[in-house]
Each structure stands twice: as C-alpha cells, then as structure tokens.
Amino acid sequence: MKTIAIALTGMALFAAAPAVAQTNLLANGSFESGATSWTSAGSTSFTTAVAAGVSVSPFPTSAGSPDAAGTKVAQLLSSSGVTPSTISQSISVVAGTIYSIGYDLVLFNAAAAGTFSTTVKLGAVTLAGLTVASGSLTSGTWVEKIVTFKALSTGTQALTVTYTPTATASKSVAVDRVYVQNIPEPASALLLLAGAAGLYRVRRRKS
Ligand SMILES: [Ca+2]
C-alpha cells in the first residue's frame, strides 16, 4: 500500500506542475518534416543540410534547443532579387511568462556577392539579441543565438525569421532548431523534482 501511495503522490505532483520545461512551443522547429507547420515567403527551401552545402555538426554544445539537429534545415536564399525571405509560425503566449527563444544558423554560399542580415520577431517585437549580420559568421560554422523574452500580453503571436539580402546573389543562410520554450518558475521546477524523486523511490522499492 505504501508503494502505491508514493506512486500516486509522484503522479499528482507531475500533473500539478505547469508546462514541462524543455518543450518546444514551435512544431517542427528542426525542419525534419520539411515545411510542415511553417509559413514561408520569398526564396526559402526546406531541405537537407548537405544540399545547402553545410554540415549539420558540430552544433554548439551549450545548445538551449530541445530539438535534435537531424538532417534537414531551412535555407533562406536571395534568388528572387533582394526581397526578404521569411519563415514564420504562430504560437500562443501568456502575459507575464518568460520564454527562452533561440535558433542556430550557418553561413553558406560564402563566395557570393553582397551580405545579409537575419532578424527574428515575436509579433511586432524584434528580438534584438537574435539579429545576425553575415559579416559576423564564418562559412560552415554553426552559431547559436538565445534570448529571454517576457510576454506582455496573452494571445497568438507569430515568430518570424527574416533574411534580408543586399544583392541577388547574396550570401545565404541555413537555419535550424528554432525554438520557444517556457522558462519554469522555481516552484514549478521544485514540483517536478519532487515528482521525479517519488517515482525513483517507487522503482527502488520494486527492484
Ligand atoms: Ca534539423
């Protein structure tokens, strides 16, 4: 009976805890399902990293993304002039909640003329810490960008990654592991730990 009680306690704690951390609020944030769940404009391609002429590894080891790198990326190109290319996906955010938002990107087609900048917006807000200029990138080396963001209103917001080239044959970028995750409040994290401890004790008793 005692074992069952502990198990139920553990489950109750898990159930009481809010959204589990390390879950990406974006679907298909690593583009392993191609364009699924994303809206795109301009010149974009959802393809293998090999086709983009870059390697998918090594990624930064301090990655904040919950998604595996996999084999596919989103390429943002400039083959239709200097029109910006965008990928975007809508998510629900809650006022007062703090989110961790980030992505990985890599420069390819480095020999091309021109430059680009890549920016990320949530709704109408530009997430300044996620802006990358091509001049700061080394071809073939993945860079990870992360910011924290506190939502000021509740509702649906589009997360948009925009690539803005300065020339038709501009250097291009591949993007991977785009994510938005809740940062759990300390109380939530403690509840999760307590739940995990309860389950661990049950397993110990059964073995
Ligand atoms: Ca991927």
Image (cartoon, rainbow, N blue to C red):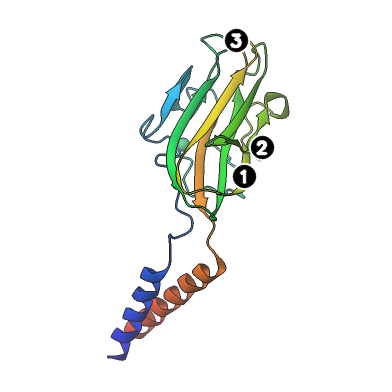
| Residue that carries the numbered disc 3 in the rendered image | 169
Q: How many marks?
A: 3
Q: CA distance from mark 2 to mark 3?
A: 26 Å
Q: Residues within 10 Å of mark 2 (few under 14, many from 20)?
A: few
How far across and how far down the image is residue 38, in percent?
40, 31
**Which element type, helix, strand or loop, lies under badge 2?**
helix
55 displayed left or right of 135: left
The tag on residue 146 is: 1
Q: Residues within 10 Å of mark 1 (few under 14, many from 20)?
A: some
| Residue that carries the numbered disc 2 in the rendered image | 128
The tag on residue 110 is: none
Amino acid under disc 3:
Ala
The residue depicted at 31 percent of the width and 86 percent of the height is 5
The residue depicted at 44 percent of the width and 60 percent of the height is 20
Q: CA distance from mark 1 to mark 3?
A: 28 Å
How far across and how far down the image is residue 100, in percent?
56, 50
How far across and how far down the image is residue 62, in percent?
62, 50
